[in-house]
Image (tube, rainbow, N blue to C red):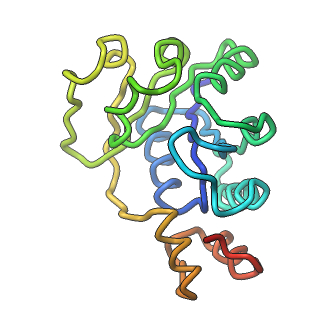
């Protein structure tokens, strides 16, 4: 199978995440996209919502797309979530599958700084999603990385999980920024993340 990997804190998951996943699934003819909430990402502070809450919101968000699936591998492992460790586990469990790690074009230039990026580039391709007309700056990347990056155009949606948490904290609505089931979950939640 061809599998997209959509990692992130999903704090909370929003429609931008879903549009990116569906756009890549379609463009690269992927069989499935696996959403993997990270426990503690190496490049961010601790999440506002708990691991259980973030996992539940991802499950709700993807429940109506049969090609989307949730994996809690990084949440169960705990600690800092490094993509190379996760992909090592997945390629060991699914040696016949082809993986495509979905990232934003804004993250491409940071790839050389990722933990064990050389190993990761041997285990997966990267699907860099971003605005039409984006040109990969090959001068900042090692050739081995350039060869495993596919650019996928997607509509630009300026939505961030941080903005959503701030709206919730201020008592404002996050309707239409998150899927309806996630919005309902957030409305029922007693503790809006800060």
Find residue 90 and report its image quarter. top right
Between residues 48 and 25, which one lies in front from this camera angle? 48
Residue 105 in the image: x percent, y percent?
33, 40
What is the quadrant of residue 157 in the picture? Answer: bottom left
Looking at the image, which residue is at 65% across and 60% down?
61
The picture places residue 59, in percent across and down from the top left corner, at: 73, 55
Q: Extreme bottom residue here?
A: 171
Residue 67 visible? The answer is no
The front one of 44 and 105 is: 44
**Can I make out residue 20 in this image?**
yes
- Image location of residue 83, percent across then percent down: 58, 29
Give me the residue at 56% from left, 69% from top: 178
Residue 78, x across and y down, in percent: 76, 38
Frontmost residue, 46 versus 153: 46
Relative height, residue 54 to residue 3 (above, below)? below
The image quadrant where one finds the C terminus is bottom right
Residue 23 against residue 87 in the figure, above or below:
below
Q: Is residue 154 above or below residue 95?
A: below
Image quadrant holding the N terminus, namely top right
Quarter of the image for residue 68 reads top right
Count the marks.
Answer: 0
Q: Where 51 falls versus 80 (above or below)?
A: below
């Amino acid at each position: 199978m061809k599998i997209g990997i959509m990692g992130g804190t999903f704090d909370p998951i929003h429609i931008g995440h879903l549009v990116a996943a569906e756009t890549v699934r379609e463009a690269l003819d992927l069989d499935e996209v696996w959403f993997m909430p990270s426990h503690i990402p190496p490049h961010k502070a601790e999440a506002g919502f708990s691991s259980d809450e973030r996992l539940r919101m991802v499950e709700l968000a993807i429940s109506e797309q049969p090609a989307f699936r949730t994996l809690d591998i990084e949440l169960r492992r705990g600690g800092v979530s490094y993509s190379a460790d996760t992909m090592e586990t997945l390629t060991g469990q699914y040696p016949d599958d082809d993986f495509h790690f979905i990232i934003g074009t804004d993250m491409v230039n940071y790839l050389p700084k990722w933990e064990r990026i050389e190993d990761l580039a041997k285990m997966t391709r990267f699907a860099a999603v971003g605005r039409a007309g984006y040109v990969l700056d090959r001068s900042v990347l090692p050739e081995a990385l350039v060869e495993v990056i596919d650019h996928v155009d997607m509509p630009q949606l300026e939505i961030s999980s941080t903005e959503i948490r701030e709206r919730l904290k201020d008592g404002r609505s996050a309707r239409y920024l998150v899927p309806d089931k996630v919005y309902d979950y957030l409305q029922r939640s007693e503790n809006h993340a800060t």
